[in-house]
Image: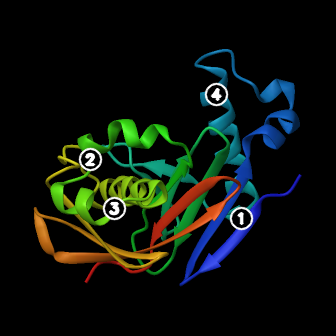
Amino acid sequence: MNAKLFTINNVQIAILKVDEWKQKIPQKKIKKTGTEKRNIEIEGVRYLLSQFLPEHKLTYNTNGKPLLNEGGFISISHSKSLIGIAWSFDYNIGLDIEEIHERIVKVETRFLNDFEIELYQTMNDKIKIWCIKEALIKLYDDKTFNLKNELIISKIDENKWAGYSTKNPNQKFEFSTFEFSNNIICFNTNGGK
């Protein structure tokens, strides 16, 4: 069982498929605390780190944001079917993974502002906006954002987007998105300009 590695704009993204990974975890590694899903995610991240960043240890800041102890930046995300890490040694990174599913339409008014609702009608665009807003929260290391009004997203082309916070409008990030295994994967391709 191998993880899939993507390299885009000085960002490395390693992805595991949960169903394949779940069958490979040694039974002694499964903890008896927490949910099975959470334990699988933790072991999946450990596996990805051991395969791709063996010289690094994962630490966390006071807000719970993951960091690499030997320098560089890391972001972790998972969906129902994927576990992923993204890292860069050049700039802060935000990663989000979301399953492609129609349920996004039921909650769109909670995170899309009027401008976004008017311009972006497809389900995939709505999922991409959700992913980018989640990645922005990780980049800013701030979980207090109002998703609808304080995080602004615009589309450059089908898989290139831009986003920023109204709290810090001079720091604009560019994002790439792509589909993999019925999921949208989103990450920033710059450190904020």
- Near mark 2 (Cα within 10 A), the count class, few <14, some 14-19 or many ≥20, is many
Disc 1 to disc 3, how far (Cα)?
22 Å
- Of 117 and 131, nearer the camera is 117
Per the image, label 1 sits on a secondary structure element best described as: helix
Residue 78, image quadrant = top right
Q: Label 2 sits on what residue type? A: Phe
Question: Which circle's residue, 1 or 3, is located before the other in the chain?
Answer: 1
Which residue type carries mark 1?
Phe
Compared to 10, does 4 lie above or below?
Answer: above
Q: CA distance from mark 2 to mark 3?
A: 18 Å
Foreground pick, 70 / 33: 33
Q: Nearer the viewer, mark 1 or mark 3?
A: 3
- Percent x, y of residue 141: 29, 54
| Mark 1 to mark 2 CA distance (whole Å) | 34 Å
Q: Which residue is mark 1?
A: 52
Tell me which numbered mark, 2 or 3, is placed earlier along the sequence: 2
Read off the residue under disc 2: 111
Residue at numbered disc 3: 139
